[in-house]
Amino acid sequence: MSRLKLAVALAAGLATAGCDSIRDIFSTDDPPLPGRRLAVLPTPDILKADVRISDVRIVLPRPAPNAAWPQQAGYPNHAMHHLALGRDPRQAWSVGAGSGSESQGLLSLSRSRRLLAQPVIADARTFAMDSNGTVRGFDLKSGRQLWSQGTLPRHERDGDVGGGIAYHEGQLFVATGAAEVLAMDAASGRVLWRRNTGAPMRSPPAANDGRLFVVTTENTVIAFDTKDGKKLWSHDGVAARTGLLGGGAPAVDEGVVVAPQSTGEVVALRAESGTLVWTENLGAAQRGNPVGGLSAIIASPVIDRGVVYAVSNAGRLAAIELASGRRLWDIELSSRQTPWVAGDYVFVLTNRAVLAAIRRSDGRVRWAIRLDRFTDDDDLAGGRPFWTGPVLAGDRLVVAGSHGEALAVSPYTGEVIGWIPLSRGVFIPPAIAQGTILFLDDSGRLTAMR
């Protein structure tokens, strides 16, 4: 992977969106100042295994088939547990799914397009949104394109896209960076309704029990009726002065929607009314802090067995009781990747490429490995890879890299047990359903393996 492309990728993931002055900071021709360099922010995610549980054997539920991956991070609660996948998946098909990532200027995010939306799978079809906001439907078995539909108004097609897609009861919902949410017929791509949200969206929507939930860049959570687009309620959060590109989807379970915020807060609301249940702050920066965007929660929260698992970019993974908001435990760890919960463990990938198994009862680390140790020197020529994931399927954790390779890791020991070659770099976690794993690479190519 080239140095230029990796730099663009890192800029998109780390720089603050809408902050044009960052271009000026890095474009100076002045020589660097002498002296020792110190990190501006702490890097607490160098995890080590806890010797107190080193002899505890990890036991997971048996892999189970799933018919769908309908939304960002899977089901509405994002708890997918242990999925079924063949022992040696091979490429079944690979197709172009539209425009890939592009950027006008290395560090400029004001005029950039990145692939942000994870593909979804439902009704024997898969759906993907490209960097121009065009959504396509494909046959899951053959990869044949079924339909294509643009989602952006003509005057917005030169702006950022962002957002994502979600499937629910025969409809496909699209959140866009043009401050609109759309409902489409999943079989044909026909637009059923379109509503303005008042501010752009950088994160995917969530849908459950006839309601659609979106989070705007101003941290407003809005609920719509999925049938007709009627606005049901809204909850105003605290707008951050800056924000990272992308964002996590709300998690929905037991009548509660848990929405991540760019301030580092997690907000729990009644799905029916929008009434506040509780709020918790996982960010290091306080409200109104000019670098508050670095505290953003980019990963989707997970709700599993009455507990919320949420991680922030600023350095905190927490287990929170869904009913009360009581924090059960937390651990210093920064991540932009959605945690994966299965059995008695939470598997998480940190910003410093550490993959770890964390006991869900108390937050203790059972094992932790540095993924960069398993990367060839040739792949490091342009810098260290960006990793995404994990997903758990067929007794292995799968993580994909920006250098065009995915790793298979044993969830029981942390041992690397295999490699999956990819045609291009991947910045979006794979999706799995019906024994098929889908990778959407940064060029916009969608590849199915089974």
Image (cartoon, rainbow, N blue to C red):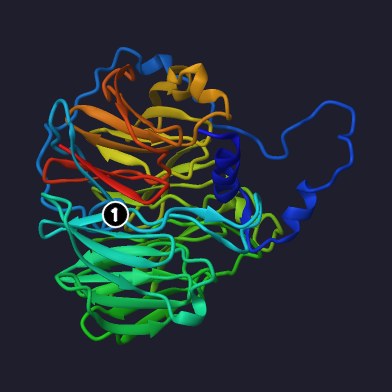
Looking at this view, is 275 or 149 the one in front?
149
Residue 271 visible, this orientation = no
On screen, residue 128 above or below 151 = above
Place residue 230 in its image quadrant.
bottom left
In percent of width and height, residue 246 lies at 48, 57
Amino acid marked by disc 1 = Pro
Callout count: 1
Residue at 46 percent of width and 81 percent of height: 154
Looking at this view, is 260 or 344 the one in front?
260
On screen, residue 416 above or below 404 = above
In percent of width and height, residue 80 lies at 22, 45
Residue at 86 percent of width and 43 percent of height: 29
In percent of width and height, residue 63 lies at 12, 34
Residue at 51 percent of width and 17 percent of height: 377
Place residue 267 in its image quadrant.
bottom left
| Side of 439 where 319 appears, left or right | right
Would you call the spot at circle 1 few (<14 residues within 10 Å), some (14-19), or many (20 or more)? many
Check the picture and name the quadrant holding the C terminus.
Answer: top left
**Residue picked out by circle 1:** 119
Residue 265 visible, this orientation = yes
In percent of width and height, residue 167 lies at 22, 65
| Side of 434 where 51 appears, left or right | right
Residue at 34 percent of width and 53 percent of height: 118
Q: Secondary structure at mark 1?
A: loop
